[in-house]
Image: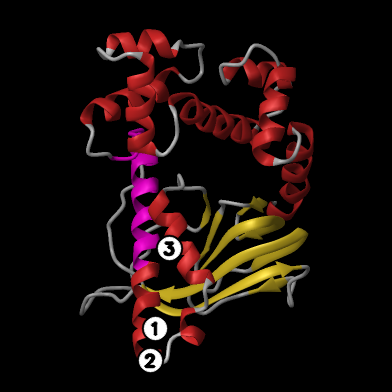
Amino acid sequence: MLNLGFIMPSLIQHKFWKAKEQFLLQVDTYEDWVIFLVERGSFRYTVGEFGGVASGGDWILCAPGTPFRREVLSRVDFHFLSFTFLPKPGEEPPAPLPAGHYRPEESERSRDTLRQLRADILAANADPGYAQALKKHLLNDLWLHLFASVREASTGLPRQTEDPLMRSAAERIRMEAGSPFVIKQLASELGLTPVQFTRRFKAAYQLNPLQFATEIRLHTARKLLAETDFTLDAIAWRCGYENGFYLSRKFKKQTQTTPSEYRKESLRVRPILL
């Protein structure tokens, strides 16, 4: 379990890049913390000891002084944010999250925050001071979203919601995502009809119960593809799917790539990490 201490970042720079075909430098090192927040497209990367393929929804967090290697695979839209964490008097600069790859659950609020950042607030607003302050507020909002997601993942708990019954349902789905489960049966145990359960769960998590389970299953599949040599059928079984063919269909629909392609890209970066 990660021992996470919360601290708010201080924004230095933000820039949104659209349809970028290649990076100016294949390897770069930054003086401050940076986040590459991908909206579309993909690129292969290594950050210190971590590596993989980043695509839409991925956040790559890079610590100061760490070499960041990257290569565009398909034209990529992404946010570049640089920031620092100010230590308290007499303390060393904090490192509140490990550098590496993150994929927090999307929410309506996080999507709206990214939409505002894409709009180039500084250029559109006549008051640059106000615009910069707003950008700092938006970064803080994104950081809270990321921090909460990592904390919940490290404890094995679902994202918090004001609906305690749906919180229990989400934890149950997390625990049983690797085996078949029936929405009707779970709804009955919660004292709800399937329709009531689905509507209430989606209001709490922006996903219906089956979509929520699919996200958990495919997260497990990506991890097993990258870190083991299990066959596709063996991975499917561990993720709650009947066979590798069915997993492959789900995987490609969600990620726009096949399991074999994903594993191949993951293997390509491993020699760099040795």
Query: In the rendered view, would you say 36 is above or below 152?
Result: below
Residue that badge 3 annotates? 113
Q: Residue at x 51, y 86 (%)?
A: 123
Drawn side of residue 238 relative to residue 108, left or right: right
Residue that badge 2 annotates? 127
Q: Position of residue 220 (x, y in %)?
A: 56, 30
Element carrying mark 3: helix
Which of the 4 image quadrants contains residue 171? top left
Q: Residue at x 48, y 26 (%)?
A: 213
Can residue 142 be seen by looking at this rendering? yes
Which of the 4 image quadrants contains residue 221? top right
Element carrying mark 1: helix
Graded by Cα atoms within 10 Å as few (under 14), some (14 to 19) or many (20 or more), the crowding at tag 1 reads some
Q: Residue at x 40, y 57 (%)?
A: 97
Residue that badge 1 annotates? 131
* Amino acid type for the residue under numbered disc 3: Thr
